[in-house]
Image: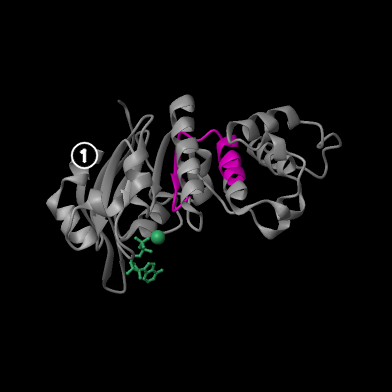
Amino acid sequence: MNIILDVRNLSKSFHGLQAVDFVNFEVREGELLALIGPNGAGKSTCFNMLMGQLKPTTGEVFFQGENLVGKYPRQIWRKGVGRTFQITGTYSSMTVVENVQMALMSHRRRIFSIFPYAHKIYKEEAISYLDMVGLADQAERHCAILAYGDLKRLELAIALCHKPTLLLMDEPTAGMAPTERESVMQLTADIVKDQNISVLFTEHDMDVVFGHAHRILVLNRGKLIANGSVDEIRNNPLVQEVYLGGGNLFEVAS
Ligand code: ADP
Ligand code: MG
């Protein structure tokens, strides 16, 4: 499988605290890759560096061969590194399908307000994205009244509009009930397969990680301590010890 993202010697220190400590990993084409680790391990800091929101102290991030370090978030996004954005207050007064239409227009650099047929254009296409995330039947509802899990699905549909090659999802299921978490992760896994995109995600729920990830990276105190398949990570004594303070990772998770 081709390498989409190649992260080399990535580190970030905050006033002497080594939040990310010379991390190396790759994301391959069509891969659903989990980044796990205890709170404060450096996962979000890593994500923020990949997205251009935080400048690394050291390192390179090659996306399809091009170094992203030093580029602005929007430039990185335009190159095909997507992320899920929370729907802001401004857009919550619009309907579900209008939010997706807006995203499609923004992707194609059209401006909503000056375009007379804005309500018609992209509607069919927008609905196809909603269909992809199981929200087509909610198309005409206002976002403000959507259930939390449905809002997360909408955020995913919007991220997909930009046709990312790589999608970064930092705690996509935070705040969800276990069944909803499972269903959003299953949906993400299906999308990875159908669209052949790569996803790098963080997740606390080990059942979800072991159930869906193709490969797992484990971060602890800024250091990457393991990188392997679900079985390799499950049986890695160092991971069990550091991540869960001993015991069997699988037994604890199930
Ligand atoms: P995780 O997402 O794995 O929970 P974070 O990347 O958020 O971990 O944090 C890693 C470490 O870096 C923590 O000790 C956190 O307090 C610290 N940290 C994160 N962001 C900042 C910041 N902007 N300034 C100072 N310290 C930070
Ligand atoms: Mg975090």
Find numbered disc 1 in the image and state the secondary structure of the residue it sits on: helix
Q: Position of residue 31 (x, y in %)?
A: 36, 33
Q: Is residue 18 shown left or right of residue 207?
A: left
- As displayed, is residue 62 above or below residue 43? above
Q: Looking at the image, which residue is at 46% across and 57% down?
A: 53
- As displayed, is residue 200 above or below residue 42? above
Q: Position of residue 139 (x, y in %)?
A: 73, 39
Residue 23 can be seen, yes or no = no
Q: Looking at the image, which residue is at 23% across and 58% down?
A: 243
**Residue indicated by mark 1:** 231
Residue 98 can be seen, yes or no = yes
- As displayed, is residue 158 above or below residue 145? above
Direction bottom: furthest residue: 15
Please give the range of residues in magenta. 153-172
Q: Is residue 77 magenta?
A: no
User: Where is the N terminus found, in terms of image quarters?
Assistant: top left
Q: Quadrant of residue 54?
A: bottom left
Q: Is residue 173 shown left or right of residue 131?
A: left
